Image (spheres, coloured by chain):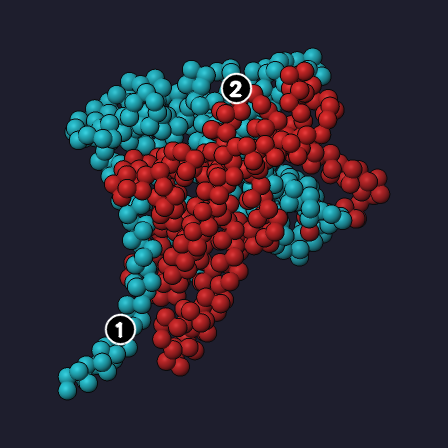
Amino acid sequence: MSQMTAPPARRSWWRRNQIAITPWLFLAPGILFFAVYVILPIFQSIGISTTQWDGLGEPVSVGLRNYEELYYDPAFYVSLRNNLIWLVLYLLAIPAGLFIALFLNQTVTGIRIYKSLFFFPFVISQVVVGLVFTWFYDPAFGLLNVMLGWFGAGPVNVLGDPNYVTYGIIAAGLWPQTAYCMILYLTGLNAVNPELIEAGRLDNAKGWRMLWHVVLPQLKPATFIAFVVTIIGALRSFDLISIMTNGGPFGESRVLSFYMFEVALSEYGFRMGYGAAIAVVLFLIMLCFISYFLWSMYREERQR
Amino acid sequence: MFPTPIEKASPTARIAYKSVLPIALILWLLPLIAVAVFSIRPAEDFTNANYWGIPSSFEGFKNYGAVFFQSDMPRYMMNSVLITVPTVLGAVALSAMTGFALGVYRFNGNLLIFFMFVAGNFVPFQILMVPVRDLTLDLGLYNTKRGLILFHIAFQTGFCTLFMRNFIRQLPGELIEAARVEGVAEWRIFWYIVLPLMKPALAALAVLIFTFIWNDYFWAVVLTQGPESQPVTAGITSFNAQYRAAYHLMSAGSIVAALPPVLMFFLMQRHFIAGLTLGAVK
């Protein structure tokens, strides 16, 4: 008897609560994966940063001693300084991308192919971009020095010179990043309201004034995304440094992300605790930007 | 349209524009063109320091043949495919579900969970590195493709959820309401109503994630070691160590390694750009 009545009862319970429970069922696998591989590790890393650990034995708790060591570590300041240079110079990708987008926002025949070919560098892996630019800079045969030679300058060993190396790598990184910003702005320009442009023309706005007062305000969403991806990209720089210089010469091209990897996993020994401490510092820097991004998104959500 | 269409400009300006275009493109792609030229040169050109002159002979077939038949390159490529494809499927499947849940339902904590995914997607890899490597070791998945796939799926779910949720928010809500009134079960709404409408988003995400994962280098280095599981981005460094100073082979190898995402981009261009620029237009 009970067997016969139970199913309908359960179904009606399910009916009543279906809308409340369904989203959690759909979220469960995603949240589980994300929590195990992304959210929890952040806290674990913070924990590991207070230990001394070679990755194999038992971690030994050392309190804040890793951070104290960081405070007196010249390599840490070199990395921090380079991170700052990366952040500032990487942002050049945004105006550069806008410039190319304006240049290509025409309707001559074949322009679509030009647009995709200009975007091309973004699709290539950073590893290959790194290799390509390493050869481009090569002091013996690199195209850069061939071209400098035409003007009677050079040769310059960009990647071998502590003064130039970071700038050389950033230039390589700007290549795909500019392409990304360009595509964002091309899409944005496509959606610019033509009536506003015409109105601006009637008011005799031209060139720079038109760009600044009429077009750029409409490109604001594109600029925001370009800003987000460029900042994240600058702080994530790792591949190019690892491929082009491996941090050298004399550790002068390190950034925090690379230095952390070097300390934690390089041939010089596995210092997981110290590496985690560097990662925490990088995370805190990133957190300032993440909070700003989330805050902007939150305002947008509330407006809807 | 801004800037002023060139058709409205003087004929000289039009001709100038059309001739500047190809020059600008060649300058922009110069480093890449140089590598392409390197990859078809014979080895002697490099010993004779004929770097930028006319190639003394065309050795494209020989160089690319060496990459494909005399090195570990095909193996690395295969590993990349076997890592990338399951990741794409996994991340898209998981995020279709999370995106549906966060985009359609109103419940306490919705925005909080959404922001958790978004924020997690932005964190530096290094803060995850030690624990993720440790977890992968504990699971016995270090130096396996599966270990790499599991992590990639989890991490990409962040970005994909952001994407899917925002896409679903733009869909007409009346359809779902109408189905509910008809008494259609929620999972059927997902499968038969929302999922078909999400096809463009699924395609855009699939090509984007394919490119991101194919080009990943950091996690490949952290979680794998040898030719049996390393993807091509990590493999190319061992390849280059093997052929040190053989620039014709290294160039050919680099081009081969870079090619699949490039093909993907040109074949699926519309989806690719729609994915990258989501949110760039209001």
Which of pointers 2 and 1 indicates the residue nearer the eye? 2
> Could one spot residue A222 in this view of the protein?
yes
Task: Residue at the far bottom: name it.
Answer: A1
Seen in the image, is A27 located left or right of residue B9?
left
> What's the residue at 57%, 48% (across, down)?
B264
Q: In the rendered picture of this protein, how many numbered marks are placed on residues?
A: 2
- Amino acid under label 1? Asn
Q: Chain of mark 1?
A: A
The residue where tag 2 is placed is A159
Structural distance between the alpha carbons of marks 2 and 1? 63 Å
> What's the residue at 19%, 85% (across, down)?
A4
Seen in the image, is A88 located left or right of residue B67?
left
Please state the horizontal and vertical placement of residue A206, each as a whole percent of the image. 70, 43
Task: Residue at the far right: name it.
Answer: B11
Q: Chain of mark 2?
A: A
> What's the residue at 28%, 31% (across, down)?
A276
Chain B shade in the render: red
Give me the disc on residue A17: 1
- Amino acid under label 2? Leu
Helix, strand or loop under label 1:
helix
Say above or below: A183 vs A273: below
**Closer to the camera in the image, A246 or A226:** A246
> Could one spot residue B278 in this view of the protein?
no
